[in-house]
Image (cartoon, helix red, strand yellow):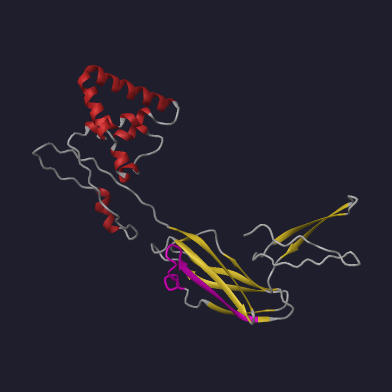
Amino acid sequence: MKETVFFFPQLYTDAEGAVVIKFTMNEALTRWKFLALAHTTDLKTAISAREVTTSKDLMVLPNPPRFLREGDLFEFSAKVSNLSKGPLKGSAKLELFDATTMRPVDAEFENASNTLAFEAQAGQSAPLFWKIKVPEGQVGALTYRVSATAGDFSDAEENTLPVLTNRMLVTETLPVYVRGGKTRSFTLESMKTSASSKTLSPYGVTLEMTSNPAWLAVKALPYLMEYPYACSEQIFSRYYANTLASSVLDGAPRIKTLFEQWKNSGALESQLSKNQELKSLLLPGNPLGAGG
């Protein structure tokens, strides 16, 4: 919304000292502050401050919630205000769109009867209610458009609401150790029992394999050294990581040269930074879990 209204400042008074100002208001239904300063040739001044409200003869005012949650069944409310001098009869319509694609989603939200008739007397308002049901897993953000028409008058408002999920992503992990040439069977108990759940929906399975798990702990040392907090636990973690790294390098000087080569080639980059799914498993405030 523009915060100022433009008009040419060349103003002239009539014989009685009155000034008529004509200009086009911005398209904003709000309250404005009008400031006027007048002065004479001998520097006599006067200041006037007034408030001006811009409105329309017919206004539609939606009353949406702050957000929607999947599975909700509720009434979307609005009102039509009649600021004209006579009664108004007309219709109001609620349209729903997917905010990312602007695809109509009235059917998904069961907004079949999206047009309502209203009647409002002069200076009064008429309430409007639409029953909608928020589907699950179809829309991440909803754009609503409420419009009203009555004779030659019309008004509309459009805005967007977030649609929150009522589900939580839970990640289960299981360490698997198998020596070369051996075969072992493992079972994720949580996945085994999930078949009996009526609300759980499997998302995906990821398998990470390394021939030398000890290197994962070595690659986690830079993370321990650079942890941003300064509590006693983190100070000890940095001390432990630096001491361990110094011990390895002092005991085998040739490893230092090898580390420099790996550092330049990116071989020492942590798996947490390479794999976003692994990174999501890290618990903030528990840096020792970085090597797990």
Query: The N terminus is located in which quarter?
Result: bottom right
Query: The C terminus is located in which quarter?
Result: top left
Q: Position of residue 133 (x, y in %)?
A: 46, 68
Name the side, left or right, on which 141 lies relative to 156: left
Q: How many marks?
A: 0
Is residue 95 rendered magenta in the image?
Answer: yes
Magenta segment, which residues? Answer: 89-110
Q: Is residue 47 above or below residue 63?
A: above
Frontmost residue, 8 versus 147: 8
Frontmost residue, 198 versus 288: 288
* Residue found farthest to the left: 181
Q: Is residue 261 above or below residue 16?
A: above
Residue drawn at point x = 39 percent, y = 52 percent: 168
- Residue 105: quarter of image: bottom left
Residue drawn at point x = 37 percent, y = 25 percent: 238
Is residue 44 rendered magenta in the image?
Answer: no
Residue drawn at point x = 20 percent, y = 21 percent: 254
- Residue 212: quarter of image: top left
Q: Is residue 217 visible?
A: no
Name the side, left or right, on which 200 lies relative to 184: right
Frontmost residue, 56 versus 198: 56
Q: Is residue 49 above or below residue 222?
A: below
Q: Position of residue 6 (x, y in %)?
A: 70, 61
Q: Is residue 54 visible?
A: yes
Name the side, left or right, on which 86 lies relative to 130: right
Frontmost residue, 13 versus 258: 13
- Residue 158: quarter of image: bottom right
Q: Position of residue 160 (x, y in %)?
A: 51, 62
Q: Position of residue 153 (x, y in %)?
A: 64, 78
Residue drawn at point x = 24 percent, y = 22 percent: 256
